[in-house]
Amino acid sequence: MKLPGTPSAWSRLERPLFLLAVAMLLWVPPPSLEAQQARRPSRIGVLNAAWAASHPTVEGLKAGLKELGFEDGRDVTFDIRFTEGKLNTMPAAAEALVKAGVDLIFTSQEAATHAAKDATESVPIVFTLVGDPMGAGIVGNLAQPGGNVTGVSSLQTELVAKRLEVLKTLTPSVRRVWLIYYSVDLGTTPMITKALEAAQRMKLEVAPKGVLDAGELKRVLGEVRRDDAVLAPEGSNPDLTIAIIERSQALRIPTVFGTALWIGYGGLISYGPDYYAQGVQAAALVGKILRGARPRDLPVEGAEKIDLAVNLKTAELLGLTVPRKILLRADAFRR
């Protein structure tokens, strides 16, 4: 019999059970390590030979990732290493990015890509501005790159014939073209072969000359004669390209470049991929990798945006009249 004021067995259990139920409702389990890592922004290491962090390919990469929903600071962060033209510091910069624990490395030019590839076999690498990825030994197959590297090719070999055609259209009297390239870049060999084949059809003589620095360039340009011209393909050494622009203006030598970027620095004419657009295009590959894809399964892409640009002021300096055919087809002018 229950005595007055004596709790029943049920009432003795009721309060503890109630408190337990409330605690279970209020308790939120701590996030798992996997969930914490998923919320951490992906760290993108950037490696190039530029003189500032705002290289056009990097700006294109950031814009492309933003379009894909990757917010800077929330989803991605950037660790940018630019070597101000000092290619001998590339290996150390690449190793520093790997030690810093970046999740992906974004490179521009052949030298930077080789440095990144030598520094790691596991961190994904996405390259831009590599003229011939297979010729350079960066990938063994464009469709199935294998390893930890993929990217966007600037189509150096594929576009060289068109550059010679543009040069011939602008300067019909040209008979010999000096193909001046950075001699350390391995990817130039297939491009030279293609240039020699194209020159034969155009009745041009092509003289390939590999140079390492401005001193060697000066000696080579000292051999240039009247009715000669220069083809300056894209390379890993930006200082060399600037030197070609300065010397070609001083010597009044018509020169065709690989991208419109150099027209802004006084280059005469260019035909080739846009740097910013390559960054935007590469962002799609970066986005896929950050979402789980493997570089080895992502085919190397060719640059999609190819521009013709001409500097009218430089043409006037060289005493050239830009043909209507080029004026109508040009995507950009510099006056």
Image (spheres, helix red, strand yellow):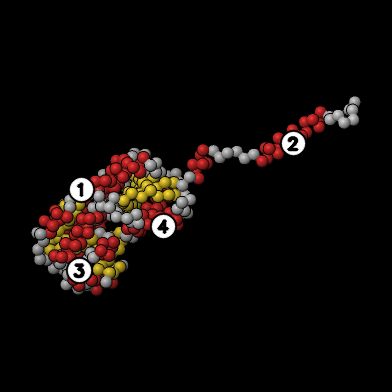
- Residue 170: numbered disc: 3
> What's the amino acid at mark 3?
Leu
Q: Quadrant of residue 295?
A: top left
In front: mark 1 or mark 2?
Answer: 2
Earlier in the chain: of badge 1 and badge 2, it is 2
> What's the amino acid at mark 1?
Val
The residue where tag 4 is placed is 63
- At 25% from the left and 50% from the top, the residue drawn is 86
Earlier in the chain: of badge 4 and badge 3, it is 4
The residue where tag 1 is placed is 184
In front: mark 3 or mark 1?
Answer: 1
- Residue 18: numbered disc: 2
- Closer to the camera, 1 or 301? 1
Check disc 3: other Cα within 10 Å, few if <14, some if 14-19, many if 20+.
many
> What's the amino acid at mark 4?
Ala
Dot 4 falls on a residue whose secondary structure is helix
- At 11% from the left and 61% from the top, the residue drawn is 224
In front: mark 4 or mark 3?
Answer: 4
